[in-house]
Amino acid sequence: MRKPELAALKLSNPLHLLALGFGSGLSPVMPGTMGTLAAIPLYLLVQGLPLWAYLGLLVLGFVAGIKICEAATRAIGRHDHGAIVWDEIIGFGITMIAAPAGWGWIAAGFVLFRFFDIAKPWPIRWFDRRVHGGVGIMLDDVIAGLFALACLQGLAAFL
């Protein structure tokens, strides 16, 4: 069942559709995890791009994400509602920068990103608590993505 505060969000509104991760954020269980799962097909579409183009899409997604997340927050009336998962999509994309090919690496990136996004070790938790608005919603997941990226690249170098 859809939560009452989400009634203001319309999947017909492009900003809301993106904020909700194409509807994945509406999952009644683990919407952040569902949003990260929704990021996998998007990653598969862009993984073969040159690095400069991939990074450009991430920067564009981050900048647009500030507006996207703010629009959804205003509609809901609550900061960083769990249904807003655009930040997870960008965070997972960061995790997967220059990742080795293969489903095992996608799974590893997924697990690492979810770990850092949920556990929120310092400084992720600091940013999550002190930076608000669209920037705040995006920033903690960007940092979680960078932590997961470092771990994934370290794992790839080790193996």
Image (spheres, rainbow, N blue to C red):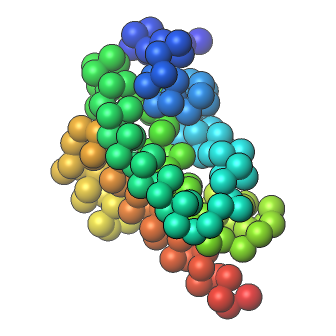
Residue 102 seen anywhere in this rendered image of the structure = yes
Q: Is residue 12 left or right of residue 105?
A: left
For image coordinates 32% across by 34% down, the residue present is: 67
- Residue 4 occupies quadrant: top left
Q: Is residue 58 left or right of residue 74?
A: right
Image location (x, y in percent) of residue 73: 32, 26
Judging depth in this view, the residue of 14 and 30 nearest the camera is 14
Image location (x, y in percent) of residue 130: 19, 51
Residue 102 versus residue 24 in the image, above or below: below
For image coordinates 52% across by 67% down, the residue present is: 52
Q: How many numbered dots are placed on residues in this image? A: 0
Judging depth in this view, the residue of 45 and 138 nearest the camera is 45
For image coordinates 24% across by 38% down, the residue present is: 133
Q: Is residue 141 left or right of residue 50?
A: left
Judging depth in this view, the residue of 149 and 2 nearest the camera is 149
Residue 54 versus residue 84 in the image, above or below: below
For image coordinates 59% across by 25% down, the residue present is: 23
Instruction: Spot the residue most to the bottom.
Output: 158
